[in-house]
Amino acid sequence: MASGSIYVPRDEKFTGSSPQNLYLTFWMAGRKNRLRVRAAITAVGFLLGNLLAYRYGWANPFGFGLLTGLAAGGVDLLIAWRAHERTAVWRGKRRGEVRTGRLLRLTLRRYGYRVMDGRAVPGQASIDHLVIGPGGLWLIDNEAWGPDTVVARYGGRLFFDEKYGTTVAKGLISAGTALAQLLTKETGIEVTIAPVLALHGGRIEGRGGVVTGEGLAVAYPRKIAGLIRSEVVMELTEEQVELLARTAARVVPRMPVTRVT
Protein backbone atom coordinates (compact mmCIF):
# COMPACT_ATOMS: atom_id res chain seq x y z
CA MET A 1 0.00 0.00 0.00
CA ALA A 2 1.25 3.49 -0.82
CA SER A 3 0.41 4.78 2.65
CA GLY A 4 2.04 1.84 4.47
CA SER A 5 1.09 -1.59 5.76
CA ILE A 6 -2.22 -2.05 7.52
CA TYR A 7 -0.54 -4.65 9.79
CA VAL A 8 2.49 -2.65 10.92
CA PRO A 9 1.91 0.58 12.87
CA ARG A 10 3.69 3.66 11.63
CA ASP A 11 6.87 4.49 13.54
CA GLU A 12 7.80 8.15 13.86
CA LYS A 13 11.48 7.12 13.76
CA PHE A 14 11.11 6.49 10.04
CA THR A 15 8.88 9.35 9.02
CA GLY A 16 9.41 13.00 8.21
CA SER A 17 12.65 14.62 9.27
CA SER A 18 13.31 12.50 12.36
CA PRO A 19 17.01 12.00 13.25
CA GLN A 20 16.74 8.30 12.38
CA ASN A 21 15.26 9.02 8.98
CA LEU A 22 17.87 11.68 8.23
CA TYR A 23 20.65 9.31 9.28
CA LEU A 24 19.42 6.62 6.87
CA THR A 25 19.04 9.19 4.10
CA PHE A 26 22.62 10.41 4.49
CA TRP A 27 23.92 6.86 4.88
CA MET A 28 22.38 5.80 1.59
CA ALA A 29 23.54 9.00 -0.11
CA GLY A 30 27.13 8.23 0.91
CA ARG A 31 27.11 4.69 -0.48
CA LYS A 32 28.79 5.56 -3.78
CA ASN A 33 31.56 7.44 -2.04
CA ARG A 34 32.15 4.53 0.36
CA LEU A 35 32.39 2.13 -2.58
CA ARG A 36 34.92 4.38 -4.32
CA VAL A 37 37.04 4.62 -1.19
CA ARG A 38 36.81 0.84 -0.67
CA ALA A 39 37.89 0.23 -4.26
CA ALA A 40 40.90 2.53 -3.76
CA ILE A 41 41.84 0.76 -0.52
CA THR A 42 41.56 -2.61 -2.27
CA ALA A 43 43.78 -1.40 -5.13
CA VAL A 44 46.42 -0.09 -2.73
CA GLY A 45 46.35 -3.39 -0.84
CA PHE A 46 46.79 -5.27 -4.13
CA LEU A 47 49.80 -3.15 -5.14
CA LEU A 48 51.45 -3.42 -1.73
CA GLY A 49 50.93 -7.18 -1.74
CA ASN A 50 52.59 -7.45 -5.15
CA LEU A 51 55.53 -5.30 -4.07
CA LEU A 52 56.06 -7.34 -0.91
CA ALA A 53 55.93 -10.61 -2.85
CA TYR A 54 58.50 -9.35 -5.39
CA ARG A 55 60.68 -7.84 -2.65
CA TYR A 56 60.98 -11.08 -0.68
CA GLY A 57 60.84 -13.45 -3.66
CA TRP A 58 57.57 -15.09 -2.70
CA ALA A 59 55.79 -17.29 -5.20
CA ASN A 60 52.76 -16.01 -7.13
CA PRO A 61 52.96 -12.24 -6.47
CA PHE A 62 49.65 -11.68 -8.27
CA GLY A 63 47.81 -14.11 -6.02
CA PHE A 64 49.38 -12.64 -2.89
CA GLY A 65 48.47 -9.13 -4.06
CA LEU A 66 44.91 -10.24 -4.73
CA LEU A 67 44.72 -11.71 -1.23
CA THR A 68 46.02 -8.55 0.47
CA GLY A 69 43.75 -6.36 -1.65
CA LEU A 70 40.66 -8.34 -0.71
CA ALA A 71 41.73 -8.31 2.94
CA ALA A 72 42.15 -4.51 2.91
CA GLY A 73 38.76 -4.02 1.25
CA GLY A 74 37.18 -6.47 3.67
CA VAL A 75 38.52 -4.58 6.69
CA ASP A 76 37.07 -1.32 5.36
CA LEU A 77 33.72 -3.07 4.80
CA LEU A 78 33.77 -4.46 8.33
CA ILE A 79 34.49 -1.02 9.83
CA ALA A 80 31.62 0.55 7.89
CA TRP A 81 29.25 -2.29 8.82
CA ARG A 82 30.10 -2.06 12.51
CA ALA A 83 29.58 1.71 12.50
CA HIS A 84 26.15 1.23 10.92
CA GLU A 85 25.16 -1.65 13.23
CA ARG A 86 26.01 0.43 16.31
CA THR A 87 22.96 2.55 15.46
CA ALA A 88 20.63 -0.46 15.04
CA VAL A 89 18.91 -0.07 18.43
CA TRP A 90 18.56 3.69 17.98
CA ARG A 91 17.03 3.09 14.53
CA GLY A 92 14.57 0.55 15.92
CA LYS A 93 16.09 -2.40 14.07
CA ARG A 94 17.23 -4.16 17.24
CA ARG A 95 15.99 -4.30 20.84
CA GLY A 96 18.68 -3.15 23.23
CA GLU A 97 17.43 -5.11 26.23
CA VAL A 98 17.45 -8.35 24.23
CA ARG A 99 21.01 -7.85 23.06
CA THR A 100 22.30 -6.87 26.50
CA GLY A 101 20.47 -9.74 28.22
CA ARG A 102 22.02 -12.29 25.88
CA LEU A 103 25.51 -10.89 26.43
CA LEU A 104 25.09 -10.95 30.20
CA ARG A 105 23.85 -14.53 30.33
CA LEU A 106 26.51 -15.74 27.89
CA THR A 107 29.40 -14.26 29.86
CA LEU A 108 28.28 -14.25 33.51
CA ARG A 109 26.33 -17.42 34.26
CA ARG A 110 29.44 -19.59 34.28
CA TYR A 111 30.81 -17.48 37.13
CA GLY A 112 27.79 -17.94 39.38
CA TYR A 113 25.82 -14.82 38.45
CA ARG A 114 22.05 -14.76 38.05
CA VAL A 115 20.54 -12.55 35.36
CA MET A 116 16.88 -11.51 35.69
CA ASP A 117 15.30 -9.59 32.83
CA GLY A 118 12.35 -7.18 32.68
CA ARG A 119 11.52 -6.49 36.31
CA ALA A 120 9.16 -3.94 37.87
CA VAL A 121 10.47 -2.43 41.11
CA PRO A 122 7.45 -1.55 43.30
CA GLY A 123 6.78 2.18 43.17
CA GLN A 124 9.65 2.78 40.73
CA ALA A 125 10.40 2.64 37.03
CA SER A 126 10.81 -0.80 35.47
CA ILE A 127 14.33 -2.12 34.95
CA ASP A 128 15.74 -4.16 32.09
CA HIS A 129 18.15 -6.41 34.01
CA LEU A 130 18.99 -7.34 37.60
CA VAL A 131 22.29 -9.17 38.06
CA ILE A 132 23.09 -10.98 41.32
CA GLY A 133 26.38 -12.78 41.90
CA PRO A 134 29.48 -13.28 44.04
CA GLY A 135 30.56 -9.67 43.50
CA GLY A 136 27.25 -8.03 44.39
CA LEU A 137 24.15 -6.70 42.67
CA TRP A 138 23.72 -4.51 39.59
CA LEU A 139 20.72 -2.84 37.98
CA ILE A 140 21.14 -2.37 34.26
CA ASP A 141 19.00 -0.28 31.94
CA ASN A 142 19.35 0.26 28.19
CA GLU A 143 19.40 3.63 26.45
CA ALA A 144 19.66 4.33 22.71
CA TRP A 145 21.31 7.56 21.57
CA GLY A 146 22.22 8.97 18.20
CA PRO A 147 25.67 8.21 16.73
CA ASP A 148 26.87 11.78 17.33
CA THR A 149 26.13 11.71 21.08
CA VAL A 150 29.25 11.91 23.27
CA VAL A 151 29.16 10.59 26.84
CA ALA A 152 31.98 11.89 29.03
CA ARG A 153 32.90 12.93 32.54
CA TYR A 154 33.95 16.49 33.30
CA GLY A 155 34.79 17.68 36.79
CA GLY A 156 33.37 14.52 38.32
CA ARG A 157 30.02 14.88 36.52
CA LEU A 158 28.62 12.79 33.68
CA PHE A 159 27.39 14.44 30.51
CA PHE A 160 25.37 13.15 27.56
CA ASP A 161 26.34 15.97 25.23
CA GLU A 162 24.87 18.94 27.16
CA LYS A 163 22.65 16.84 29.45
CA TYR A 164 23.69 15.82 32.95
CA GLY A 165 24.10 12.06 33.35
CA THR A 166 22.12 11.88 36.56
CA THR A 167 19.19 13.59 34.88
CA VAL A 168 19.20 10.96 32.15
CA ALA A 169 19.38 7.99 34.53
CA LYS A 170 17.72 9.30 37.69
CA GLY A 171 14.99 6.65 37.41
CA LEU A 172 17.59 3.87 37.38
CA ILE A 173 19.43 5.28 40.40
CA SER A 174 16.16 5.70 42.31
CA ALA A 175 15.06 2.16 41.43
CA GLY A 176 18.40 0.77 42.62
CA THR A 177 18.09 2.52 45.98
CA ALA A 178 14.50 1.35 46.48
CA LEU A 179 15.28 -2.24 45.50
CA ALA A 180 18.32 -2.35 47.81
CA GLN A 181 16.14 -1.28 50.73
CA LEU A 182 13.48 -3.85 49.85
CA LEU A 183 15.94 -6.76 49.54
CA THR A 184 17.68 -5.74 52.76
CA LYS A 185 14.37 -5.80 54.59
CA GLU A 186 13.29 -9.15 53.11
CA THR A 187 16.57 -11.05 53.51
CA GLY A 188 18.37 -9.37 56.39
CA ILE A 189 21.42 -8.92 54.15
CA GLU A 190 22.67 -5.34 53.93
CA VAL A 191 22.41 -4.83 50.17
CA THR A 192 24.08 -2.28 47.92
CA ILE A 193 23.11 -2.12 44.25
CA ALA A 194 25.25 -0.52 41.53
CA PRO A 195 23.37 1.09 38.61
CA VAL A 196 24.72 0.67 35.09
CA LEU A 197 23.46 2.26 31.89
CA ALA A 198 24.02 0.22 28.72
CA LEU A 199 24.62 2.67 25.89
CA HIS A 200 23.47 1.71 22.38
CA GLY A 201 24.83 4.15 19.83
CA GLY A 202 26.74 7.26 20.79
CA ARG A 203 30.38 7.37 21.82
CA ILE A 204 31.84 6.93 25.28
CA GLU A 205 34.92 8.97 26.11
CA GLY A 206 36.25 6.63 28.75
CA ARG A 207 38.87 3.96 29.16
CA GLY A 208 37.77 0.61 27.80
CA GLY A 209 34.31 1.80 26.75
CA VAL A 210 33.25 2.61 30.32
CA VAL A 211 32.79 5.96 32.09
CA THR A 212 31.65 6.46 35.68
CA GLY A 213 30.52 9.42 37.72
CA GLU A 214 27.90 10.50 40.26
CA GLY A 215 27.17 6.92 41.29
CA LEU A 216 26.46 5.74 37.74
CA ALA A 217 28.47 3.68 35.26
CA VAL A 218 27.82 4.03 31.52
CA ALA A 219 29.21 1.30 29.27
CA TYR A 220 28.84 -0.32 25.89
CA PRO A 221 26.76 -3.53 26.25
CA ARG A 222 29.71 -5.79 25.42
CA LYS A 223 31.75 -4.20 28.23
CA ILE A 224 29.26 -4.61 31.07
CA ALA A 225 30.08 -8.23 31.96
CA GLY A 226 33.75 -7.34 32.31
CA LEU A 227 32.83 -4.34 34.45
CA ILE A 228 30.74 -6.52 36.75
CA ARG A 229 33.45 -9.14 37.16
CA SER A 230 36.22 -6.60 37.77
CA GLU A 231 34.44 -4.45 40.37
CA VAL A 232 33.22 -5.94 43.63
CA VAL A 233 30.20 -4.07 45.02
CA MET A 234 29.87 -6.50 47.94
CA GLU A 235 31.10 -10.04 48.54
CA LEU A 236 28.37 -12.67 48.63
CA THR A 237 28.47 -16.39 49.35
CA GLU A 238 26.75 -18.92 47.11
CA GLU A 239 23.98 -19.26 49.71
CA GLN A 240 23.46 -15.48 49.85
CA VAL A 241 23.31 -15.27 46.06
CA GLU A 242 20.66 -18.00 46.04
CA LEU A 243 18.63 -16.29 48.79
CA LEU A 244 18.77 -12.88 47.11
CA ALA A 245 17.86 -14.33 43.72
CA ARG A 246 14.86 -16.23 45.11
CA THR A 247 13.73 -13.20 47.08
CA ALA A 248 14.09 -10.87 44.08
CA ALA A 249 12.07 -13.29 41.95
CA ARG A 250 9.31 -13.12 44.55
CA VAL A 251 9.19 -9.40 45.40
CA VAL A 252 10.17 -7.92 42.02
CA PRO A 253 7.56 -9.12 39.50
CA ARG A 254 8.40 -9.77 35.88
CA MET A 255 7.17 -7.18 33.41
CA PRO A 256 4.48 -8.48 31.03
CA VAL A 257 5.74 -9.21 27.54
CA THR A 258 3.99 -7.19 24.85
CA ARG A 259 3.58 -8.96 21.55
CA VAL A 260 2.66 -7.27 18.28
CA THR A 261 0.16 -9.27 16.24
Image (cartoon, rainbow, N blue to C red):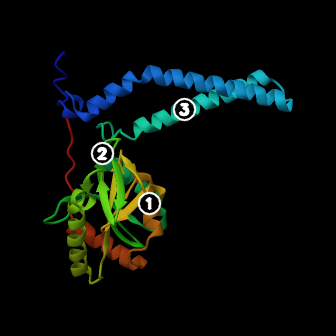
Q: Which amino acid type is shown beneath numbered disc 1?
A: Ala
Residue at screen point 32% across, 47% down:
96
Q: Judge whether 167 appears above or below 232 on screen.
A: above
Task: Give neighbour class at mark 1: few <14, some 14-19, many 20+ (Cα, 10 Å).
Answer: some
Q: Which amino acid type is shown beneath numbered disc 3?
A: Asp
Q: Which amino acid type is shown beneath numbered disc 2?
A: Trp
Who comes first in sequence, dot 2 or dot 1?
2
**In the rendered image, which residue does mark 1 sit on?**
225
Q: Secondary structure at mark 1?
A: helix
Q: CA distance from mark 2 to mark 3?
A: 24 Å
Q: Going by the image, does 174 lie left or right of 38?
A: left
Res 179 quadrant in image: bottom left
Front residue (pair 27, 144) = 27
Picture coordinates of residue 156, whole percent (x, y): 34, 67
Picture coordinates of residue 162, whole percent (x, y): 26, 52
Q: CA distance from mark 2 to mark 1?
A: 21 Å
Res 165 quadrant in image: bottom left
**In the rendered image, which residue does mark 3 sit on?**
76
Q: Going by the image, does 179 lie left or right of 96?
A: left
Q: Judge whether 70 appears above or below 118 on screen.
A: above
**From where the camera sits, is residue 180 visible?**
yes
Task: Specify the farthest residue to the left.
Answer: 123
Q: Secondary structure at mark 2?
A: loop
> Mark number for residue 57?
none
Task: Give neighbour class at mark 2: few <14, some 14-19, many 20+ (Cα, 10 Å).
Answer: some
Front residue (pair 8, 178) = 178
**In the rendered image, which residue does mark 2 sit on?**
145
Q: Judge whether 238 appears above or below 55 on screen.
A: below
Q: Going by the image, does 41 lie left or right of 12?
A: right
